[in-house]
Every structure is written in C-alpha cells, then in structure tokens.
Image: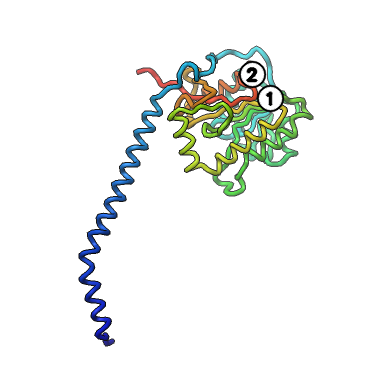
C-alpha cells in the first residue's frame, strides 16, 4: 500500500502532537481520580458525623419501654419467611399470639407448622389476602421485594397494601402495622444530617423501592384505618438488646436491630402509641 504525501504529512503532525496532548489527558485522568477520592472522603466523614449525631430530646418521642402483652391477638403476618418477618413471628409466639402467616413456599415455615396457621399463596392475589385476614384482629407486614422476582416485584408494597386495605373492613380489622424505610417522607419530618443522608442514599441506590414505599404511605394516609408505618434505617439481623430509640422527626440512628424492631411492632398492638404516624426507629449503641 502506498501513502500519499498528504497522508504522510498528516501522520507526522499527529505524532508531533501526541507528546503535547498526552500530558493533558494524563492530568485530566488524575484530576478526576482526585475528585472522586475527595468526594468519597467527604461522604464517609459526613456519614460518620451523622451516625454520631443524636436527635435532641425534643425530637425523640416519649420512651417506649418493653412491656408484656395484656391482650390476646390473632395476627395476620405478611413477609413471615423473610429476615424481619422471622423475628416478628417469634416475637408474636413468645407473647402467646395466634399467628396466621402467608408464604408462597410453606416449607420455609415448616418448623412453626404446629404452632401457626400457614396460608399458601401470593400476597398480590386479593383472594389470598382475604383468606389470610379471616379471623384476625390486626395485620402486620414485613413484606419487601424479592430479587429473584425481578420486575414482578416492582411496587409490591403498594399492591399488597391496597389488597389489605380492601379486605380489612369485611373482617372488622382496624389496625395495620408495616415496616417501611427511613427515606420515606411524611408531614412533620425535620431531618438532621443523618436523616438527610439516609434519604439521599436511598434516592441514589434504591429509587424504585423508595417510590414503592412512598406510594404505600400515600395509600395509607388516604385510608380510614388505623395504621402505623415504622420507618427503619439499615436493619441488622440481631436480637433484642434494649428498647429502640424512637423519633417522629428524624432517624435517631443509622441502624436498628431486627429483634428490637419486632418487639416494638408487637407492643404497638396493645399501646397504639403511633396510630396514623410514621415513627423512625434506631438502635442504641452498646456501651464498651
């Protein structure tokens, strides 16, 4: 192949320009690396500061000590096969409650089969929800999207909550308690730095789930039933240690233990301290 004089001239120009352009590209790459590292440091520092910041005494709701139940309840439980649902199930049984639990795969609840009533089916089916709620006096939900379901799990909480709200009047059930996220916004919120970061991170990484939870709240707010939406930060699979921190304005901590969340929700069956409200929960840090 023969090169024309023009093409050879252009090639020589390109070679001559390379040493000049390369340092600029190299400098640009280092600049972006520096910028990303700086942003990462700022993010981590902000989170550490947020995690150590506690709400003021005025921000915290009145203390909610652990108490034993003085009433018997028949609980319709959604999400019983999940991590939080397992803690809720065990907490209900410790209190002597009758439990009707929904499961698509009843084998996952086999060890409880002699102590609870298992309803087999999908919570997105209104007929299944009506069967689950039959004979119950309260509904508790720890339902969330299942990754293996893919797009089928989109807006799962909104869909199921709509089914529950439609089925509750026929069973004369007035109380619905559900696990929600700390990024969900409600009137009266006054978020501190931790609360702001919690919502910001959810908007970035969990946008679909946040939209679902926010729409679920809108359904409940428009309903006539008594509901409590428990807004949680990161939920750790750990047992009860002490009564959780509770706030109606901002997340009081960056995480909450599942055992403490379960105890709080069971207690609300009797006390109903936060009807038609969305308390934030957080766990106290252990003393060393």
Q: Is residue 223 left or right of residue 248?
A: right
Q: Is residue 186 left or right of residue 6?
A: right
Name the residue nearer the viewer: 79 or 43.
43
Q: Position of residue 154 (x, y in %)?
A: 60, 45
Measured along the vertical axis of the image, is residue 87 above or below residue 211? above
Q: Which quadrant does the C terminus fall into? A: top left
Quarter of the figure with residue 173: top right
Q: Position of residue 110 (x, y in %)?
A: 61, 33
The residue sitting at 24% across, 85% down in the picture is 5
Tell me if residue 114 can be seen. no
Q: Is residue 256 left or right of residue 110?
A: left
**Badge number at residue 226:** 1
Q: Secondary structure at mark 1?
A: strand
Measured along the vertical axis of the image, is residue 3 above or below residue 36? below
Name the residue nearer the viewer: 191 or 40.
191
The residue sitting at 37% across, 37% down in the picture is 43
Name the residue nearer the viewer: 243 or 59.
59
Quarter of the figure with residue 171: top right
The residue sitting at 69% across, 32% down in the picture is 222
Name the residue nearer the viewer: 33 or 103.
33
Measured along the vertical axis of the image, is residue 154 above or below residue 195? below
Q: Position of residue 286 (x, y in %)?
A: 40, 20
The tally of labels here is 2
Disc 2 and disc 1: Cα gap in Å? 9 Å
Residue indicated by mark 2: 272
Cβ atoms under marks 2 and 1 closer than 8 Å:
yes
The residue sitting at 49% across, 31% down in the picture is 233
């Amino acid at each position: 192949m023969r090169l024309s004089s023009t093409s050879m001239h252009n090639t020589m120009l390109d070679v001559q320009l390379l040493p000049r352009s390369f340092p600029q590209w190299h400098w640009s790459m280092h600049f972006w690396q520096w910028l990303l590292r700086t942003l990462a440091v700022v993010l981590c520092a902000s989170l550490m500061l947020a995690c150590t910041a506690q709400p003021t005494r005025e921000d915290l709701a009145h203390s909610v000590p652990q108490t034993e139940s003085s009433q018997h309840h028949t609980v319709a439980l959604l999400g019983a096969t999940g991590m939080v649902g397992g803690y809720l199930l065990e907490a209900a049984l410790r209190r002597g409650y009758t439990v009707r639990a929904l499961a698509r795969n009843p084998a996952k609840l086999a060890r409880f089969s002699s102590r609870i009533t298992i309803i087999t089916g999908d919570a997105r089916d209104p007929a299944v929800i009506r069967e689950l709620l039959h004979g119950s006096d309260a509904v508790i939900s720890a339902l969330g999207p299942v990754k293996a379901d893919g797009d089928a799990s989109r807006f799962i909480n909104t869909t199921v909550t709509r089914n529950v709200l439609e089925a509750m009047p026929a069973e004369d059930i007035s109380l619905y308690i559900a696990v929600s996220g700390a990024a969900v916004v409600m009137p009266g919120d006054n978020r501190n730095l931790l609360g702001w970061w919690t919502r910001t991170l959810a908007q970035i990484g969990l946008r679909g789930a946040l939209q679902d939870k926010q729409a679920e709240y809108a359904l409940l707010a428009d309903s006539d039933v008594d509901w409590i939406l428990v807004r949680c930060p990161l939920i750790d699979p750990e047992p009860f240690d002490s009564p959780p921190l509770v706030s109606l304005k901002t997340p009081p901590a960056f995480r909450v233990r599942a055992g403490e969340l379960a105890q709080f929700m069971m207690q609300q069956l009797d006390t109903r301290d936060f009807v038609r409200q969305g308390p934030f929960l957080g766990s106290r840090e252990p003393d060393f």
